[in-house]
Structure formats: C-alpha cells, structure tokens
Image (tube, rainbow, N blue to C red):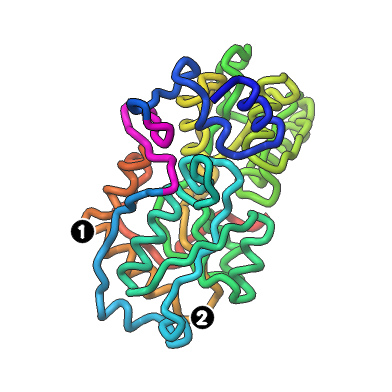
C-alpha cells in the first residue's frame, strides 16, 4: 500500500491502520500475503477468510439453551470493532469482524449447536443491545464488575490485563503507580474498566497533593495512536492484548507498565455477558469449559498470541471490580 493511501486511511480513522504498516515499522508480512502479519513469532491472519478453529456440538449442553434461542437457531453476539486488534476488529479490505473474541464466540456457538451471528456494534451500544435482548450475548473484552452484575450474568474466559502505552521515544519509561501519571495528559476509553482505574488513580494523586491528570477521550484506536505520535497525549491506558499487538506491529509505541484489570482488590476477569436471569449463562459456562478441556480454546488463544491470558476454567458471576 502506498504512503499516501496509508495517510488517507489514518486520517479517516480506519481501525486497521496499525495492521497495515510495513515490516520496517515492526510487523512482518508472511510472504506476499497482504492478509497476514507475524507478531512476536506468531503468524496472524487478518483477512476475511479466517478458517476459524471449530468445535463439535454437545447435545447435553445445547439442551440448556433457552427455547427461544434454540428455535431461531442462532447465537447473536454483540462485539465492538473499534480498532483494537487482536480482540475484535475488521478484516483487511473487508467488513468482516475478526479477532480472538469472535473466535471464542464461534467455539461457544458450535458447542451449543447454533449458527454464529456477529452484531458489529460500539462499546456504548453493546450493553443496551444485550440488556434489551437484541443481542443474546456480548463478547468484547468485557470485565466483570459488581455494578454490571446487577443487570447481566457473566461466564469468564480470560484474565484481564491492562497496559500503559507511550510513544517509542517518550521520556516516560515506567508507569506502575498513581504518582507516575501526576500532571500528565493521558487517554482512556470512556465507560470502561480502565477509565474507572484511571479516575481512581487521579483521585489518589489529588488527595496526596499531586498534580491532577488531564484526560483526553477519543472514538477509536487509530485516534489514540495518532494522539500518541503527535504528542497530544503522553500515555494511553487500554487492554494489554491490543497494546502489545500495536506496539509489535507498528514500532511506534512501547508498553511501560501493566496492571490487573481488577485493580488491587480482586483478579480482573474477562467474560461473556448475557442478560441477567435469561437462563443462558449456564450453557455458556459449560460450553466454555468444554473447549477449555478439549484444547480448542488454547488453539484460539495461541492463534492470536494470547496464550498467557488463558484461564483453567470458566466461572459464573465471580467477584467483580468493586462499585465506585
């Protein structure tokens, strides 16, 4: 792809910009295939033809699915595609949703004997879509919180790790406590677990008499990274998988700190989310435990370079991030 084309796509905030940078920027093409890159020794397929890992239907688990969902024969999965590879994003030159989240959703749908239907949505609309019943579940790097458990049921499937990302030439070399961001301009996605953590760190700084944090919000991944490169923000707090992937592929940024998505009080857990008491969570939990046990789950995580975020079992509604 030519430099002018890359610049046009960046300015229009197309999520795949970080994926399409040339090998000199940190990502390595696999042969001449424009739909594959190698990140950290893992070859990642970023094209629309995913050849996803599949699983077999388990009749006893499929029978746990509420009749209304079984009758329509599909599992409608809400997932966001705002440009955070390898979580959930758009394939190269295509509108297909791909990533580790759609892949795990596919495994669950297979075990339940349902056709997977991906509803590409925004983070802001995801929760309403699940709560209203428009989407049966949400697979979108969703952290379990006590507040969310009031309205939703959860079945866990990954650990929740966050990362602080800076420009590669930034003078910031480490962020691991609130004092490290005092007085800085930083960015985070609105309405997320990481926003709550950032606001808590800012409150701690103010209570200690340190300078407050200036928070900037953007709409998608490309905007965050453009702000980092231009110096409009000093750091970005986001999901560790996305930060690690972007840093490896683009060569423009680096990770200067990691943090548990659960904060200091509980382990951070990523889970599939469904409307509370709709009868689906037990089936989701058993489907996840099935693919964890038979190795399909491990294949998916390895496929996206996320083997270190595996969990030994799926748990229903564990303790979540405390209420604010």
The C terminus - image quarter: bottom right
Sort mark 2 into few (<14), some (14-19) or many (20+) by Cα contacts within 10 Å.
few
- Give the total number of marks visible in the rendering: 2
Tag 2 residue: 278
Residue 285: percent from the left, percent from the top?
A: 37, 68
Residue 40 visible in the picture: no
Secondary element at image label 2: loop
Q: Which residues are magenta?
A: 33-48
For residue 278, above or below residue 191: below
Residue 144: percent from the left, percent from the top?
A: 52, 58
The N terminus - image quarter: top right
Q: Is residue 46 magenta?
A: yes
Query: In terms of depth relative to the viewer, which is nearer, 268 or 23?
Result: 23
Name the residue: 46% across, 25% down. Answer: 248
Query: In terms of depth relative to the viewer, which is nearer, 252 or 187?
Result: 252
Tag 1 residue: 294
């Amino acid at each position: 792809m030519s430099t002018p084309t890359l610049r046009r796509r960046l300015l229009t905030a197309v999520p795949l910009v970080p994926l399409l940078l040339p090998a000199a920027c940190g990502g390595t093409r696999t042969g001449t295939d424009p739909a594959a890159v190698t990140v950290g020794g893992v070859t990642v397929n970023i094209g629309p033809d995913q050849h996803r890992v599949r699983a077999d239907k388990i009749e006893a688990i499929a029978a746990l699915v509420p009749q209304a969902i079984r009758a329509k024969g599909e599992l409608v999965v809400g997932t966001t595609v705002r440009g955070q590879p390898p979580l959930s994003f758009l394939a190269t030159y295509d509108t297909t949703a791909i990533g580790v989240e759609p892949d795990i959703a596919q495994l669950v749908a297979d075990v339940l004997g349902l056709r997977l239907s991906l509803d590409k949505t925004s983070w802001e609309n995801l929760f309403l879509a699940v709560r209203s019943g428009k989407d049966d579940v949400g697979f979108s790097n969703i952290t379990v919180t006590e507040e969310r458990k009031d309205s939703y049921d959860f079945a866990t499937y990954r650990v929740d790790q966050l990362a602080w990302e800076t420009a590669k030439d930034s003078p910031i070399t480490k962020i691991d406590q609130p004092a490290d961001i005092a007085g800085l301009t930083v960015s985070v996605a609105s309405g997320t677990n990481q926003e709550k953590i950032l606001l808590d760190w800012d409150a701690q700084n103010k209570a200690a008499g340190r300078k407050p944090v200036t928070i900037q919000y953007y709409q998608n991944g490309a905007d965050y990274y453009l702000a980092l490169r231009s110096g409009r923000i000093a750091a970005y707090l986001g999901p560790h998988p996305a930060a690690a992937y972007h840093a490896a592929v683009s060569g423009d940024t680096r990770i200067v700190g990691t943090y548990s998505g659960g904060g200091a009080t509980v382990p951070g857990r990523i889970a599939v989310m469904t409307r509370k008491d709709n009868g689906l969570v037990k089936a989701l939990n058993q489907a996840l435990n099935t693919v964890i046990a038979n190795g399909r789950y491990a294949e998916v995580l390895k496929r996206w370079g996320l083997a270190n975020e595996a969990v030994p079992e799926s748990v229903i509604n564990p303790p979540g991030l405390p209420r604010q």
